[in-house]
Amino acid sequence: MDKFRLYINGAFCDSASGEWFETFNPYTGQPWALVAKAGAEDVDRAVEAAHFQATEGEWSRLSPTARGHLLRRLGDLIARDAHRLAEFEVKDNGKLMAEMLAQMQYLPNYYYYYGGLADKIEGSVIPLDKTGYFNYTRHEPLGVVGIITPWNSPLNLMTWKLAPALAAGNTVVIKPSEFTSVSALEFVKLVEEAGFPPGVVNVVTGFGADVGTPMVEHPKVAKIAFTGSDATGRRIYEAAARGMKAVTMELGGKSPNIVFEDADIESAVFGVISGIFAATGQTCLAGSRLLLQSSIYDEFTKKLVEVASSAKMGNPAEPDTQIGPVATIPQYEKVLSYLDIGCREGAKVLLGGKKASAPECGTGWFVEPTIFGDVDNSMRIAREEIFGPVLSIIRFDTEEDAIRIANDTEFGLAAGVWTRDMRRAMQVPARLQAGTVWVNTYRTMSFMSPFGGYKQSGIGRENGMEMIREYMQVKSVWLNVDAKTANPFIQR
Ligand code: NAD
């Protein structure tokens, strides 16, 4: 089996313990590579290397313009190797090649965008209420940033943090998910080729308790940028608070996709389908609750089931596959358990509802695309994040009902609104408690537009111009421009 080693201070190395763990291909259900299993000692070495570069090394003395050049060079290398990186992602997380390749081809944009921004963060001269002083601000990096990512879009979600963190002048230690560690270790070869000094970007692979916890608790880590489940996010937030560290948290969702009777029905059907079944439902922004106006309930659900049942499942590496496997065994078991929960709660199975057994699915972890009708918003399948290809349909009668049901959730990551009424298209988004609202579209994203959650879906935002400030701190510098400092014991 191939072996993938840690990347610390510009060199690939074994873990201090010399241990390894297996990584699995979700399509075959079989292990395909071994990854170094790191622990606290490895985390410490990586943080020390990163801290040296953040405070004294070559990186700390590079101009922001030079940092920008490095980021743009990295973007070019990602564009060159997009196909290779996508292949590693597909092997490790089972997502469709079509989606992973598109994601990798889009990734360079983040490095070009934040590379361009690196030397455009200006401080200000403060006019002041006092004479005799000159006061200005500097926007400085935080230091070492710990990046912790999940398994669903490993390099994409890492990039949302890495590009602004580096542009701002920080150094990083990356801990990818134990289910999908390989792509970060391949990616970092491009960081080296681009010419970043050793120690600026480190990758430490392993499990949450062995690598994540010591990273969050390390006194020389200034910030944790995390994407993952709300339960882990809460634990990390508590530990980060003890160390007075900054955090950004991109957590889960139970996003409503609201279809009004005046919507363009065909577009809405396609939008709802891509909202829940793309990436086999394994996206934080999945539109997992369909809120459907009663007057179009029967017509809409019929079309929805028709289109969803035509999806081709199978090998994610094949170009015509439309739904791939679930990425991990625990996730597979979790999704199947929710299919039982939905039935027990009295929801009506309109499509799917069990593990998939078609021959194309082989030995992989496949779940049938599932649609539950007649769901009440109090049911667990309407309240808890399933993170799989499972849609819950909830009826509503009026616009007020739709808004109330949409907001009746602890999450607030995203929402969709389908309508041809201009007033509704303007007013409903303003009343939805979600960090992103799409009108007559779903899953549209850009490196230029902020993304993040309201309520339990997170803290802070990623992407967009302002977000580089999430990786910076402000220093206020005072100069006495009056020659003398007065004796403090003599009142003037
Ligand atoms: P997870 O929370 O189990 O793991 C995420 C990462 O945290 C992994 O690298 C894991 O090893 C690490 N980790 C686990 N315990 C830790 C600890 N105690 N200290 C430090 N690190 C620890 O999540 P997952 O199962 O990998 O990913 C799925 C979840 O991620 C879903 O709930 C989904 O909603 C969420 N997600 C959110 C977004 C977003 O942008 N909001 C995007 C993708 C996924």
Image (cartoon, grey):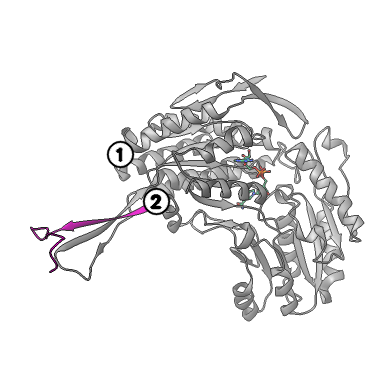
Q: Position of residue 103 (x, y in %)?
A: 59, 45
The yes-or-no answer for disc 2 within 8 Å of ligand 1 is no
Closer to the camera, 132 or 121? 132
In front of the other: label 2 or label 1? 2
Residue closest to the far front: 489
Quadrant for ligand 1 reads top right
**Amino acid at dot 1:** Leu
Q: Residue at x 58, y 63 (%)?
A: 435
Question: Pointer 2: residues within 10 angstroms few (<14), some, or many (20+)?
Answer: many
- Magenta range is 472-492
Closest to the observer: 287 or 20? 20
Asked whether, in this view, residue 359 is left or right of residue 36, the answer is right
> In the shown orientation, is residue 456 left or right of residue 289?
left
Dot label at residue 472 = 2
Quadrant placement of the C terminus: bottom left
> Is the CB atom of the residue marked by disc 1 within 8 angstroms of ligand 1's nearest atom?
no
Which disc number belongs to residue 367? Answer: none
Q: Earlier in the sequence, mark 2 or mark 1?
A: 1
The three-letter code of the residue at mark 2 reads Met
Left/right placement of residue 327 relative to residue 195 reads right
Indicate whether 311 appears above or below 319.
below
Residue 62: give its label. Answer: 1
